[in-house]
Structures are given as structure tokens and as C-alpha cells.
Amino acid sequence: MNSNHHIQKTMCYLADSALATHIDEYIAHLKCGRYADSTIDRYLACLAHFAQWMKQSHLALRHLNKTSINKFIDEHLPHCNCTKPAVQTRRDLHAACIHLLVVLRSCGAISEPTLGTDPIDEEMRKFDAYMREACGLADKTRDNQIRIVRQFLFKRFGKRIISISALLPSDVKKFISNRLALRETVSNAKAITSSLRSYFRYRTFCGDHVLALSSVIASPAHWSLASLPRALSSDEIERLLDAFPPDLPSFRRGYAMMRCGLDLGLRSSEIAKLALSDIDWHSGTITIRHNKSRREDCLPMPVSTGEAIVEYLRFECPASTNSSVFVRILAPHDAPISSYAVSKVIRKAYHRVGILHGSTHALRHTLARRMLEHGSSLKEIADVLRHRSLNTSLVYAKLDNRSLIGVALPWPGSLI
């Protein structure tokens, strides 16, 4: 049976389903995102399978939501006996159904998802607003703290009304102990304690008396500046830059991202949000607008970085209405990329050349080490890495071997 017959059969089935009146809108939605024709055909076949299940389950169109999709994939698919050929690929089915929800909401066929009425959901929305507006915390920091505090409140209250006065110091100590039993690391301990302290500060802001709760949170034993920043060696830098051969898909895009990290010390989120308007080609500068400190920083753009970005924009960047420098290479082409996508590109480059200890953040450490080797001061490093406090950059003093030699004491018993 050829593909044209499959497509005809799919369209005939959809024309006789509850989704019939919205198929044209669905196809137009995918074409607007510049999905390939083969992808559109595959997603339509997925909808035909989903429509079969809707009919079997007597599910009305107006009742469709994300829970319906999860039920279809998690409960129906493992025991599916629908008319063949029915698409069985979970990833394609999920993607196709999510696009369907977008189309149905945009035309008013189903309602927008309602905000949860769970007491913890409401509490986390208020806590998030406090962290964003009063504390100015970055999105990722807020997400991590909300995740931990949500677990703490759910362990104590479940889905009941939250009563801060009902919390006991023993509740706090028990939660921290149980969490550390799962992963007993300094970083995990710091994340748990800082999240709980942040939440109790918020509750103090709300007028609650929580001193007894916050006083039992002990800081993990960790000495400031105790660790050594893990920077890449000169050999590793060369290998990393050679990790983007011409036969690699989108090699110019990956190389330009790597240059942004190595030459400018940009974080993955800053690379992802870099816009064309942030680059001043005449003055040779680049403005970082989306950073942790929530301020704009203008940096000189190295020639190597500029050349890599130009090569990517001229010969590889797909057409897009998105104003970002780095755009998606897969549909939907006009949607922004995420910091995870940048981290994934860089992480794969590490693995291709056999460097297993690297990360996106290691590129910032590497830039700091190279600046020290060329005589830059800690203040200059702090400016380039955009640290709000000079104390954050003090850790790089341990990489300054030339200065450390000058203050080293002679070894006991040596002739020097």
C-alpha cells in the first residue's frame, strides 16, 4: 500500500470524525510553522488514531484537554487494538495532539486551561511573584526554589489548606533529612536550605511568625572559594573548536555558539536570547540584555566571535521571523530556542572530542583563566563575566600561578 493511499485513507477517516471541521485549520497551523509535508502527513495520521480513540471513549470535542491526551498515550496506547495502520509512536502522537489543542483553543472550540485551584498552586504563584518582583530572582532560580518548597508543603499538607501556624520545626528538619538521604551532596543541601529560607522570608513578609522554623535550618559545611574552577587546557580548547567539521549538520551554528561561550563567557541562556539588534557591527560591540543581574552590559566583540556569527548568518541561518541570532533548525522555525538547546549543542561537542568533564559553565572559567594568563586583573574579569560582586571572581585568584608563586612560602627543609 503506497503513501498516497495512506494519506487518502487518513483524510477520509478524519473527514468522518469529530475533528473534521478543524482539519483545515490544523494543516494551516503546521504550514505556518513551516513543517515539512511529510511531518504534516504523519501528524494527520496521528490525529486519525486519536479520533478513533475519541470515538471509542465517547469523548466529546469540547471536553478535550491535556489530561485526555495523557490518558490516550499512557492508558490506551500500551493496549491499543485500533484499526491498522494506526500510528504507535508516542513522540509523534503527543506532538500531534498538543498542536491540536493549540488549534482548538485559538478558534474557541475548547476553553483555555484554567489555573489550578489547589492551595499549593495558589501559594506558589504568590511566592513566585514575590521572588520575581521583590527579590529580582532569575527564572531558573525561581523554578528551582518553587520545586523544593512545593515538595515541602505537599509532604506536610497534601491538598489541604496551608496553615503556616501548624508547621513545626520538626517538620522542617524531617523534610531536609529525607531530601538529603536521597542525594547527600553539598549542592543539594545548599539548594534545599536556601529555598526554605527564601520561603520563610516570604512568609515573614506576609506577617507570619516563622523565626522558630527558619532557625532550625543549618547551613551545610562549605568553605567559600574552597573549590578550584575547572577550566579547559589550551589543548582541550583547540580540540573543542575542531569539534564542528563541515560534514556536521549545522556546524556553523554550533561553532558560533561555542565562540560566544569561549570568547565572551556568555551563559547558555544569554546565547539563546541573543538578538540581532544586540550586535553593533560598526562599533564592534555586543549588548547582553538578558542576564542574571537584570541589567544591560555592553562588551567588545572579538573578531573571532564576529566572524563565526557572520558565517552562520550568511550561509546557514534559516529564514525566520524571529529576531534572535540563533534560531530553530527544525519546525516551528519562528519559535525561540531554549538554553537547553544551547547546552545540548555544546555538551555534544565535548563528547565528540572525548572531553567528559566539560560543561557550558566551564567556558566561563576558561575565559577567566586565559584573561589571567594575559595579565588581566580580577576587576577586569568580573566586568567581562558580569559578576555583580567582585567576591564572586575571587575564586579565579587560585588560577593565577604567576602571582601565587610570589607569595608561596619556602618548603620546610629546602635550601631556598
Image (cartoon, grey):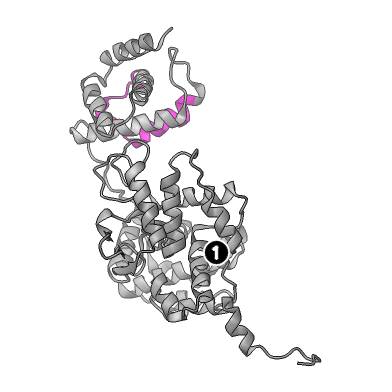
Q: Is residue 226 magenta?
A: no
The residue closer to the viewer here, 311 or 124, is 311
Left or right position of 132 against 175: left
Counting from the top left corner in percent of width and height, residue 134 is at 29, 71
The residue closer to the viewer here, 136 or 131, is 136
**Crowding at label 1, few (<14), some or many (≥20) Cα neighbours within 10 Å?**
some
Q: Is residue 63 magenta?
A: yes
Which residue is the extreme one toward the top?
1
Which quadrant holds the N terminus? top left
- Which residue is located at x 44 percent, y 63 percent? 263
- In the rendered structure, which segment of residues is drawn in magenta? 54-77
Counting from the top left corner in percent of width and height, residue 113 is at 27, 42
- Magenta part mainly helix, strand or loop? helix
Please state which amino acid type lies under the numbered disc 1: Asn
Which residue is the extreme one toward the right?
413
- Which residue is located at x 60 percent, y 79 percent? 401
341 shown above or below 387: above
The residue closer to the viewer here, 398 or 178, is 398
- Which residue is located at x 21 percent, y 26 percent? 25
Left or right position of 68 against 244: left
- Tell me the SS state at disc 1: helix
344 shown above or below 127: above
| Residue 289 visible in the picture | yes
Counting from the top left corner in percent of width and height, residue 127 is at 33, 64
Which quadrant holds the C terminus? bottom right
Which residue is the extreme one toward the left?
108
Q: Which residue is mark 1?
A: 188
Left or right position of 337 against 239: left
Quadrant position of residue 144: bottom left
192 shown above or below 347: below
